[in-house]
Image (cartoon, coloured by chain):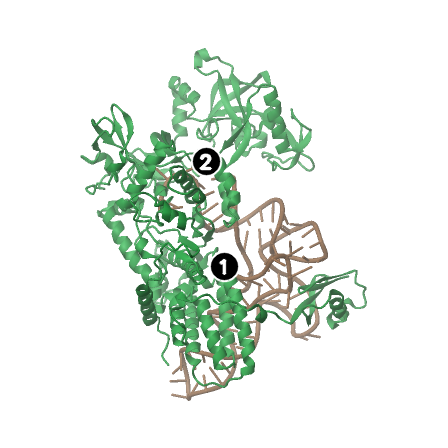
Amino acid sequence: MSRYSAAEIEAKWQEAWDKAGIFRAEVAQDKPKYYVLEMFPYPSGRIHMGHVRNYTMGDVVARYKSSTGHNVLHPMGWDAFGMPAENAAMASGGHPKEWTYNNIADMRGQMKPLGLSIDWSREFATCDPEYYGQQQALFLDFLDKGLVYRKNAVVNWDPVDMTVLANEQVENGRGWRSGALVERRELTQWFFKISDFSEDLLEALDGLDDWPAKVKLMQANWIGKSRGLQFSFGLVEGEEELGHDRVEVYTTRPDTLLGASFVGISADHPLAKELAAKDEKIAAFCEECRKGGTTEEAIETAEKLGYDTGLKARHPFDNAWELPVYIANFILMDYGTGAIFGCPAHDPRDYEFASKYELPIVTTFEPVEGEYPAGEAFVPLKSEKVRYVRGFAGEEVQTGEQGVDAAIDFCEANGVGRGVTKFRLRDWGLSRQRYWGCPIPVVHCADCGVVPEKKENLPIRLPDDVTFDTPGNPLDRHPTWRDCSCPTCGKPARRETDTMDTFVDSSWYYARFTSPRADVPIDMTEAAYWMNVDQYIGGIEHAILHLLYSRFFARAMHICGHLPSTAQEPFNALFTQGMVTHEIYQTKDANDRPVYHFPEDVTDGKLADGTEVEIIPSAKMSKSKKNVVDPVSIISAYGADTARWFVLSDSPPERDVEWTAAGAEAAHRHLSRVYRIAAEIDAAAPADATEDEALLREMHKAVRDVTLGIESFGFNASIARLYAFTNALGKSKAGGAAKREAALVLAQLMSPMTPHLAEEVWSLLGGEGLIADAPWPQADEAMLVEDTVTLPIQVNGKRRGEITVPRDMPKDEVEKLAMSSKAVIRTLDGAQPKKIIVVPGRIVNVVV
RNA sequence: GCCCGCGUGGUGGAAUGGUAGACACAGGGGACUUAAAAUCCCUAGCCGUACGGCGUGCCGGUUCGAGUCCGGCCGCGGGUACCA
């Protein structure tokens, strides 16, 4: 008997699958289709365990669906544009294109040995001109339909490198290379009108039954629908001096209007700009407000700063009541009207601000019962009832929600503003001042203005002859690339040098996979058959942006005739998987700074020279912490099936999984055991045919449980069940025929996770054809029914004993039996039960 | 700061509101072996010699019954619109 040799087996079966071409997906109208997609990888150059886990999960689904009669589409591609390629070019002088395509070749080479059931004929990279050219065509169609426009928006500006920085390139408010203090600066940028779809994107979440509730909640909060009051404060100084006689504000808490203590405006508000033009101190303060990065986090956590403009605003309910007007650094021009009224008593930010500038804090409502909180803003849930002490509409005691509604009604009736619905969702700025992205296909003409490029001129290709020796966008400083002629008038003109956000690339790749070589963005016949993605799998980090942008894109593509209306929600089911983590091994250098060590250099908590390492609990694998395990080395040591089995076995798929060397060895030992059990089935062993039924019952239960596990993404549960079934098979004294049947079914149940080993066992035991082509086994209901059940017996909710009864025993008989059991008699000790609860087939609880 | 998650033995984890710890790792004991490896069997939450008590991050609540539901804390992770 030969031993389990993953290397031999895996190469053999991968070749067999290739030869049979079974993963090639083609339209077949007579079969139900199933489209499985994992979020495609960024080509960093090396696959990591997270990829192995993500793609193995997709592969389990793909192989399972295929064996249940579906025509499966399971493609793979590369999210190939982005900053790391440019960073690599800056660091080591290469070219982003060369770097990216080399990385793709490397990663493809590392991925293929995993034995994934992928249709590689559909592979593409988003940096292929054939892909981004079609993306440019989509952009032009969007432009034509009014879904794209230009406006000013703020970016992180590095005043030393004279370049725009990404948020991750800003560290503690400074540019990562220059170290200069970053400023917010306005640029004219291209935008997608995603805000036109706010209501639809929000409402359609309800229909996404197979999406995680948390993702839908996050998206709903992100879209942020709110109802509030828009009104204006009249300014005490008239418009002769200012050009402004009022400040328009939006508030979601108009019920607290009598608690107003100041009016705040953004440093980018037109009024602030006007004041800044006349007053150097105000100008300097507005500059101060623009310091730091553009992230919401940076703005929200920065110290609250305000500047009293000296202007006064009149309270809308009382002309004599004057409020100071402040410019404040925490008010965003992008949201609402760029101006607020401050109600310190019921808003933490306003409270902090008012405390700092010694502004009044006026309570408008109190708790119905209990203490009013001291030293902080009182902000109960809007659904909670409060007592209004400075209310002006509705009941004295009502919920915040009722108070807001009543306040809006009152204000509208009295001519103070109007109730409006607003969304937090902002339009999607897609301009990037970078080289390695899809060029925006428009031309700037001195006479015609901004003109779309002609479709027949697409793709607008990136030039290859660029350098990265100086900061900034190489397209801007290229000697000739910008030169072109105006598509409208033919005169010399200049190309747009902004490229697209890489989120654009990943917002439609799922649709392009249905017709990856089409000379239009999407072949509608193919899309009609293959869309939607039936199961999408990827990381929770994409819960908001990528998925929201993709949902918008599918709608926009439909409007432009590139997707059927049924594909406007492109992902039927979503699954978000956890990360692969590993413990971290650390020692300290002479200066007490941490030094990290690779897992392969640590044995029993010691380095080769005997130095003890400190073990830090598991964290996401990262190169800087050296807590990485390379899938390539695992595959060469144990085989792909072991890696696949392990990443699925130890944790629920939505949670993180910790990679441990011991776990990987155990996985490999188990697979060897399965191989050995299968190989030994033919050998003569003492057999007892009366054991057959017990084994076959176990088999049918395993079929039921493993199938249920796969269908509900409980891969770890399926694997636990497979361990148990393997143990039963290993110990069984049943006859050869029953064992052979059980082992063939075991191979089938394992085939989505460990396809190579499954094929080997299948062929060893005389299975017909490829296991990858065999139909999924069915559980026989008759074999699943148990005659008796064991019921735990509780007294006052504590378990005191158990009884075994026929499964359909009537309640009162179960009750009698329970009451006469030794455990109950002893525990009751003569006491009379108040109540006896019998849950059939589940539990008996005696309450004293 | 704000939004969303997660927290169970020495470890990874299991558990439609119904026997907490399935399955596995590490551990302990044993069989086989001259010995080892491999394999197989048994054992195992914690405390207590038995009966028993305590246990799912912490505090409180709902329930006959809570890991699971509700409220409040603590810790960790994801997102925060130019990382992908």
| Colour brown, chain | B
Viewer-side residue, A538 vs A833: A538
**What residue do we see at 54% from left, 72% from top?**
A698
**What residue do we see at 63% from left, 27% from top?**
A406
Q: Is residue A318 above or below residue A553?
A: above
Give the image location of residue A665, x and y in percent. Answer: 41, 69
Viewer-side residue, A474 vs A491: A491
What amino acid does circle 1 point to?
Glu
Q: Kindly report the distance in space between the C-alpha atoms of the residues bearing marks 2 and 1.
A: 33 Å
Give the image location of residue A690, x and y in percent. Answer: 56, 82
User: Which quadrant is the C terminus of chain A positioned in?
Assistant: bottom right
Label 2, secondary structure: give it.
helix
Residue A275, located in which quarter of the rendered image? top left
**What residue do we see at 54% from left, 20% from top?**
A323
Callouts 2 and 1 close, C-beta under 8 Å: no
What subunit carries mark 2?
Answer: A
Give the image location of residue A682, x and y in percent. Answer: 43, 82
Q: Earlier in the sequence, mark 2 or mark 1?
A: 2
Q: Seen in the image, is A496 located left or right of residue A703?
A: left
Q: Seen in the image, is A246 located left or right of residue B67?
A: left
Give the image location of residue A466, x and y in percent. Answer: 20, 41
Q: Most extreme residue toward the top, as rendered?
A: A240
Label 1, secondary structure: give it.
helix
User: Which quadrant is the N terminus of chain A positioned in?
Assistant: bottom left
Q: Please give the residue where the numbered disc 1 appears in the rendered image.
A: A711
| Colour green, chain | A
What amino acid does circle 2 point to?
Phe
Q: Please give the residue where the numbered disc 2 appears in the rendered image.
A: A197
Q: Seen in the image, is A810 located left or right of residue A56?
A: right
Viewer-side residue, A508 vs A239: A508
